[in-house]
Image (spheres, rainbow, N blue to C red):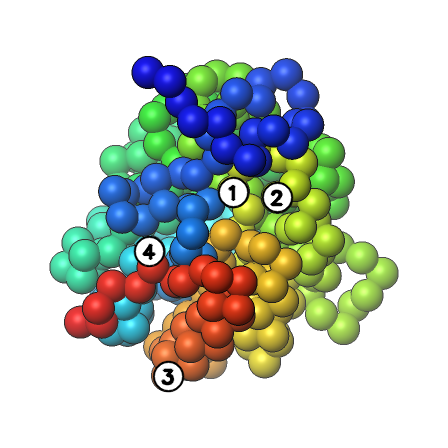
Amino acid sequence: MEREVTEYEMVAAVEPFVTVARPVAVAADVVIGGRDVVVMAGPCSVESYEQTRAVAAAVAGVGGRVLRGGAFKPRTSPYSFQGLGREGLEILRAVADEFGLLVISEVLGVEHLPLVAEYADILQIGSRNMQHYPLLWAVGELDRPVLLKRGFMSTVDEWLKAADHILSRGNEQIILCERGIRTFETATRNTLDVNAIALARQIAPYPVVADPSHATGRADLVLPAARAAVAAGADGLLVEFHPDPATALSDGEQALPLEALPRFYDQVGRVAGALGRGLGRRTPL
Ligand code: PEP
Ligand code: MN
């Protein structure tokens, strides 16, 4: 079948494996890299059924389509909460199904891949794993969307080459995610590289989303950073929300409360609208 060559594909691309059409369809009506900016919202970590269900209900309540949540957590300290593992995935899937949401969750190691792939619609590769080549090859063997976070110490070129490692094994369903890089600035957790969002969208054949939560590390900066990312051309957002950020087991300081969801969608929707895009929201439940 003849495939339509997108405008995107005509741009000189990174290197050898650039043969793919750009949008990644997570479901028939949820396409990342299409007209709509896709918001993926949820807790940093799945902590309990009640906590995750509350977030899922709130996300569905604003017409959201994708629920995020970590079951296997890459924590800087081995003494921090490491995630609920399989139980976390079971919770995530159960509440997502209840509210008709799709699931994105991190796969931390090759050994976890079969398990995470049982439950998640999008496989998230974390910043610390961007150059974990055996993991990239393993997800590259699957027929499943993969969201590849940029390493916080990685250049755009390294990030795109990491994506090509996935592509080299046959999986073309790649979504890039700019999640902030480490700079000399310590006032914020990381620095959102807005340049990289615009640049990657021009030179790579993959959709690009942004994570304003890890990029800023501060709840009060998440919305402005999200607006900036969408203005720069981001095809989606990965954002942390929690029913009670003060008691979160991970990343509470950057989590937005559920009450902030309507305004968040409204505000990023306005920026998307200025660019002729929507948020692909479902009629709220
Ligand atoms: C996360 O999304 O929960 C996460 C751990 O992000 P990162 O890999 O960007 O630190
Ligand atoms: Mn987090």
**Marks 2 and 3 in Cβ contact (< 8 Å):** no
- Mark 3, secondary structure of its residue: helix
User: Quick check: 134 above or below 81?
Assistant: above
Give the side of residue 131 with respect to residue 169, left or right. Answer: right
- Split into 4 quadrants, where in the image is the N terminus? top left
Query: Disc 4 or 3, which lies upstream in sequence?
Result: 4
Pointer 1: what residue?
A: 207
Residue at the image point whose x is 27% and y is 67% from the top: 63
Point out residue 101 in the picture as x, y percentages from the top left corner: 24, 56
Label 3 vs label 1, nearer the camera: 1
**Marks 4 and 2 in Cβ contact (< 8 Å):** no
Visible residue check, residue 163: no
Point out residue 167 in the picture as x, y percentages from the top left corner: 51, 23
Query: Disc 4 or 2, which lies upstream in sequence?
Result: 4
Give the side of residue 17 with respect to residue 89, left or right. Answer: right
Give the side of residue 234 with respect to residue 26, left or right. Answer: right
> How far apart are labels 2 and 3 at the CA level?
32 Å
- Mark 1, secondary structure of its residue: loop
Pointer 2: what residue?
A: 201
Pointer 4: what residue?
A: 66
- Kindly identify the amino acid type of the residue bearing the numbered disc 2: Arg
**Marks 2 and 1 in Cβ contact (< 8 Å):** yes
